[in-house]
Image: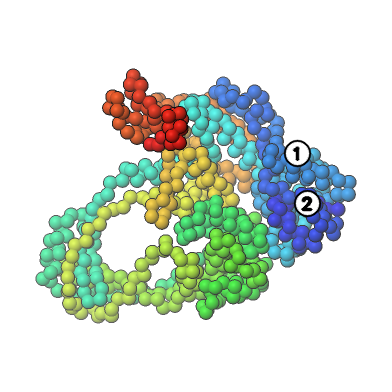
Amino acid sequence: MQLIIAEKPSVAQSIAAALGVKERKQGYLQGEGYLISWCVGHLVELAEPEAYGDYGKWQYADLPILPDKWQYSVLPSSKQQFNILRQLMVREDVTKIVCATDAGREGELIFRLVYAVAGCTKPVLRLWISSMEETAIRKGFADLRPSAEYDALYHAAICRAQADWVVGINATRLFSCLYRQTLRIGRVMTPTLALIVQREAEIAAFHPVPFYNVVLAMNGFTATSERMDRKEDAERLRSVCMDASVIVKRTERKEKSEKPPLLYDLTTLQRDANRLLGYTAQQTLDYVQSLYEKKLCTYPRTDSRYLTSDMADGLPVLVNAIAKAMPFAKKLPITAEIQQVINDGKVTDHHAIIPTMTVREADLLTLPTGERSILYLVAARLLCAVGQKHDYAETIITLECAGVEFTAKGCTELHPGWRALDAACKAMLKDKDEKEVTEKPLPIVAEGEVLELISVSVKEGKTTPPKHFTEDTLLSVMESAGSDDAPEDAERKGLGTPATRAGILEKLVKTGYVERKRAKSTVHLLPTHKAVSLITVVPETIQSPKLTAEWEARLKEIEHGLLAPEDFMTEITHMVQELVNTYEMAQDGQVLFDQPKEAIGVCPRCGGRVLDAPKAFSCETKDCGFVLWKNSRFFSAKRKQLTK
């Protein structure tokens, strides 16, 4: 018997269907010479500090905590499934094990930890696929690889986990002990938080500067002057232009093309879904993961936006099938410029996210709304990416009035190309975010022609501050943060990976560092008082994206066998030791974390402020003594609750 271990039950079921395995057992499937089970995500994790000694109480004197020999623990919620896997592994009739977890760094780690903690020594083969379609699964099983080929990938994965543990545990306890409150620190989380805090500081420090333009209105179009700093200058020009002639100085017409967009990787899909549909990064990941498990999309946790050359022959058939299945593509011309999306050199572990042939038979209307919308985006992006370029003509008319130049710009669409499909998909999704104002065509005028001036006005504007981060814009910055410090040939740059960025954002919200606040149809990510205080006291090394850039470069070296894992961990250990031994608490740092409390009323006894405490509403003046208890029997007897 071969034991196949997948990452999730749904993936195990897809594999079972492809291999003809139908008999269901408790925690696994059986038949055709196979046992197929699953991990339910992470079953095994690095043990808590308490496993290494008396570290239950957080104390500065215990730092740094640096395990000599790493220990692991089975998650309490996963013990039952872990025991099933262990029992299957030791069965005498099981001669081989197939690792069928997700094909990537984390998938490799999930399987290897279960294998090690279960004490298994049987030979392992690796299934490496990017699609859950039956043809892809069967092809993958025909080309199983020895597990040893992925040892370096595992070493990079376990080094990442151990380094995150060492930095996270020690830095969190260090700052929590010094500032006497829980302050979570993370190698990716803290630099991401620093980006948000820095953006808000830029907005707070911004002072708008007014500027002025003079606008000429002719028959059918307007022309605008250069910006002016002083209103008096603009008013003076307006006055002069009212009695002056408007002459066409020159006209320029340039035909331009806009290339089709690249295919989606996970981050660009998350950005579009946030901007167009309002989904969080985590929601998008959950939806596209579900589509993958339903065999409707390829593997989602990818950072590539291209396909491989071995997919080229089947791509025209897929494009036509997707076009027929998508309601927004009906009656629109479909092309398949396949070479636009093929680039072997830009595909690492996984190719871009695309829909699968299974979409042909699926009843899309039965999909949950979120999954269906994401599938539409992915399908539209494939059709656009292999579509024709969008051609348009840009016209610029330069006018002269009172010796000053005025400019008018306009656009004329020559060939819609891929833009037609893009617009049709967004119209179906009722996209309210896209507010692109298409420039109107300008009338035909000749150089030297004198135009009739209808009116002259002064338009006042102001420089605008940077915008609050949304998940769309923050993901974009995370993707490129620290790139200047990363090697030019680094395969991964930025903060985190496509697979981890959504989790980082959710963690920032759950730990009370970031709040989601809606303004009209947009949700902004804003730092809390605690977050601003933390970034104020944390040293640059911890909050800079440079650290992550360096880590990713080093982890890639481990993956490629160019760096020994123990050398990497030695570097991390030295960094943490230096942090603990040299960091000095910021002067008056504790005061930073004392958030001013909101007054909810005026004290009727002394006129001071009444504050909201966990158990009572009380006067902030200690000698006053005015208090109203929230659990007062007086109100309870009347079945009333004392509110603000």
Q: Which residue is mark 2?
A: 28
> Which amino acid, by three-letter code, is at mark 1?
Val
Q: Looking at this rendering, what residue extends furthest in the front direction?
A: 638
Give the x, y percent position of residue 598.
36, 34
* Residue at image location 14% in from the left, 63% down from the top: 237
Q: Looking at this rendering, what residue extends furthest in the top direction?
A: 623
* Viewer can see residue 164: yes
Give the x, y percent position of residue 95.
86, 49
* Residue at image location 38% in from the left, 44% down from the top: 200
* Residue at image location 23% in from the left, 55% down from the top: 211
* Residue at image location 55% in from the left, 62% down from the top: 369
Nearest the camera: 111 or 327?
Answer: 327
Give the x, y percent position of residue 113.
72, 42
Q: Where is 90 relative to 448, above or below?
A: above
The number of numbered badges drawn on the structure is 2
> Which amino acid, by three-letter code, is at mark 2?
Tyr
Q: Secondary structure at mark 2?
A: strand
* Viewer can see residue 483: no
Give the x, y percent position of residue 305.
57, 61
Asked if residue 313 lies left or right of residue 630, the reply is right
Q: Looking at this rendering, what residue extends furthest in the right direction?
A: 92
Q: Which residue is mark 1?
A: 117
Q: Are marks 2 and 1 in contact (CB under 8 Å)?
A: no
Quarter of the image that includes the C terminus: top left
Give residue 432's quadrant in the image.
bottom left
Dot 2, how many residues are within 10 Å of its Cα: few (below 14), some (14-19), or many (20+)?
A: many
Whole-angstrom CA distance, mark 2 to mark 1, is 19 Å
Q: Where is 21 relative to 620, above or below?
A: below
